Amino acid sequence: MATGHIFDIKEFSVNDGPGIRTTVFFRGCPLRCIWCHNPEGLERGRGVLVRQNGCLHCGRCRIPCDHPECRGLGRCLHACPMGLIEELGREWDAKSLAERLMRDAELYASSGGGVTLSGGEPLLQYEFAIELLRLLPVHKAIETSGFASGEVFKRVLDEVDYVMMDIKLADSEAHRRYTGVDNAPILENFKRLKESGKPYLIRVPLIPDITDTTENLSKIATVVGDSPVELLPYNRMAGAKYPSVGKTFTDLITKTENNPIDLSVFQNATLRRDAH
Ligand code: SF4
Ligand code: SF4
């Protein structure tokens, strides 16, 4: 049975697809969007979260530790006198995770909800995702960057009922600069999504002066045509979690407020009120 690394399971989600849902956050993402607000989901496999508030800088967590739970993490999970260290995420087998998610089957049924795979990027652990999806007799959705081979994308698409997919930047060079990858596979997968006939929503994160320019939004509008689009305001707290996972937030986002958004460039777009 396939196993996968999950860094969070969020119950009672109302923004991750229809109805009330449980959202499963997969660890690992091939992109490095400079605005990512889930840095704890970027790396694959095991990791460590070190909360910064209250750290005594005593260094005990850095003393080499051979405990089986700490091996390979570069930190001792048990030495912190302030209890600031925890393992990031957990490895699940598909059957155990499906049983855990189906505990709320009645809630999904009564609210028209279900389970949503998110991340990180769930397509990166596609074999585990497919096995999990096949064990879930409920409405299934995925939140994805769309960055995967066409074959992987189609295989996962076959298993879900609803897709929320990002298109962040229409220009390929800008996409490489701000997300670390080319947007060609994403645009190809968008075509596959459209042709599949599955219900979907295109999401555009609005990053000040980077993705929220009229030029970028107009180009995305041309690509998506009459597809439903949701625009997500910039999350000003995006950088908050970076130090606790040993990463540094970008200094390339110099504004914290979005520019005025011209929704009329789209045929079918809504602007979400809360931040992404
Ligand atoms: S053991 Fe805890 S208090 Fe000491 S340096 Fe590590 S995180 Fe900070
Ligand atoms: S695709 Fe999502 S999870 Fe991956 S880096 Fe971009 S914002 Fe973060």
Image: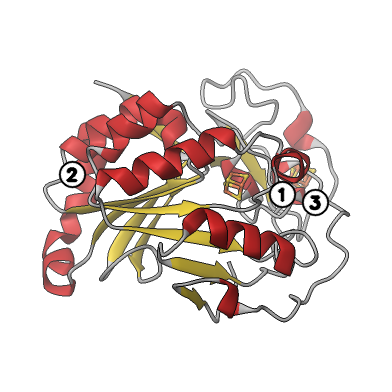
Asked whether the beta carbons under mark 3 and mark 1 sit within 8 Å of each other, the answer is: no
Q: Residues within 10 Å of mark 3 (few under 14, many from 20)?
A: some
Q: Is residue 27 visible?
A: no
- Type of residue at label 1? Ser
| Figure quadrant of residue 227 | bottom left
Residue 185 spot, x, y in % from top left = 53, 33
Q: Nearer the viewer, mark 3 or mark 2?
A: 3
In the rendered image, which residue does mark 2 sit on?
99
Name the residue tied to disc 1: 244
Secondary structure beneath dot 1 equals: helix
Against 203, is 7 above or below?
above
Structural distance between the alpha carbons of marks 2 and 1 = 31 Å
Q: What residue is disc 3 on? A: 249
- Mark 2 is on which residue type? Glu
Taking the spot 59% from the left edge, 33% from the top edge, the residue there is 30
Between 117 and 223, the one lying in front of the other is 223
x, y percentage for residue 222? 55, 58
Cα gap from disc 3 to disc 2, whole angstroms: 36 Å
Q: Note whether 249 is above or below 235 in the view shown.
A: above
Task: Look at the image and tell me whether residue 134 can be seen.
Answer: yes
Residue drawn at point x = 30 percent, y = 35 percent: 156
In the image shown, does 95 or 206 lie closer to the viewer? 206
CA neighbours of label 1 inside 10 A, class few (<14), some (14 to 19), many (20+)? some
